[in-house]
Image (cartoon, rainbow, N blue to C red):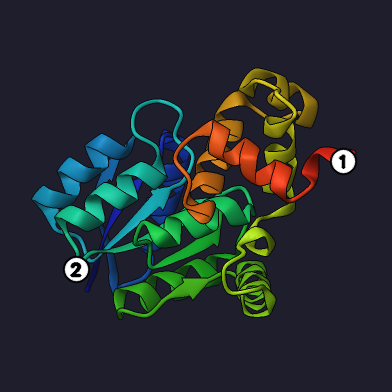
Amino acid sequence: MIKILLVDDHAVVRSGLKMLLNTNPEIEVIGEASEGNEGIKKALKLKPNVVVMDLSMPHGKDGLSATTELKKLMPEINILILTMHDDEEYLFRAIQGGASGCILKSAPHDELMSAIESVAAGDAYLHPSAQKRLMEEYMAGVKQDGNDTYNLLSEREKEVLTLIAKGYANKEIAEQLVISVKTVETHKGNLMEKLQMKTRPELVEYAVKKGLLGYDI
């Protein structure tokens, strides 16, 4: 029996997933949580085989943070990220945080079942488009110069990096790219992690050396 903990901020989504999963005689939903902190507490108490974790939960701890913290507390646990957005940045951060897999909320029911069975067995699961993105990211790393990680940056990260170098604040970057300030901060964090930098001036210096100030976005 695969014991499941559902972590999603929408009660209707949790209810629908529970009804669906409980139709499988080998799967049992043993608990639910509406945000990351509650999910961590219930996982520690209920000890599920798989946590199906919503990625975006605006109230309380989000799925990325909860995944990272939960894997530190329970290294043996398997976490399947459930998301509406096919965004490689969140995907890669989730994997780095310890997620066993990622599946879109729009995926067919049988794919969700297969994903849960895979991660419960200790295997990794990525939806098809994520597999393609991961391969592209890997190939970019293979082709790049050993000490230059610029080619590992996504196009969006390059845009954010260029705007940072031009002196734009996070709010201004968000307006320029028509994204939220929180998303800008996420991209900035990814930049610093990939480039192994800790401050904004370091990012600016790097962008100048790469000649990004001469690019038009």
C-alpha separation, residue under disc 2 versus residue under disc 1: 48 Å
In this rendered view, identify the residue nearer to me: 207 or 77.
207
83 lies left or right of 52: right
175 lies left or right of 137: right
**Type of residue at label 1?**
Gly
Circle 2/circle 1 CB separation < 8 Å: no
Residue 94: quadrant of the picture: bottom left
Q: Helix, strand, or loop for circle 2?
A: loop
Q: Earlier in the sequence, mark 2 or mark 1?
A: 2
| Residue 30 seen in the figure | no
Q: Nearer the viewer, mark 2 or mark 1?
A: 1
Q: Is residue 204 above or below residue 23?
A: above
Residue at image point 81% right, 38% down: 213
Q: How dense is the environment of label 2, judged by Cα within 10 Å: few (below 14), some, or many (20 and up)?
A: few
Residue 1 position, x and y percent, is: 22, 74
Q: Which residue does the numbered mark 2 point to in the structure image? A: 76
203 lies left or right of 22: right
Residue 50 position, x and y percent, is: 29, 63
**Type of residue at label 2?**
Glu
Residue at image point 79% right, 47% down: 211
Q: How many marks?
A: 2
Q: Which residue does the numbered mark 1 point to in the structure image? A: 214
Looking at the rendering, in which quadrant would you find the C terminus? top right
Residue at image point 56% right, 47% down: 191
Q: How dense is the environment of label 1, judged by Cα within 10 Å: few (below 14), some, or many (20 and up)?
A: few
Residue 36 position, x and y percent, is: 31, 39
Residue at image point 58% right, 52% down: 89
Residue 185: quadrant of the picture: top right
Q: Helix, strand, or loop for circle 1?
A: helix
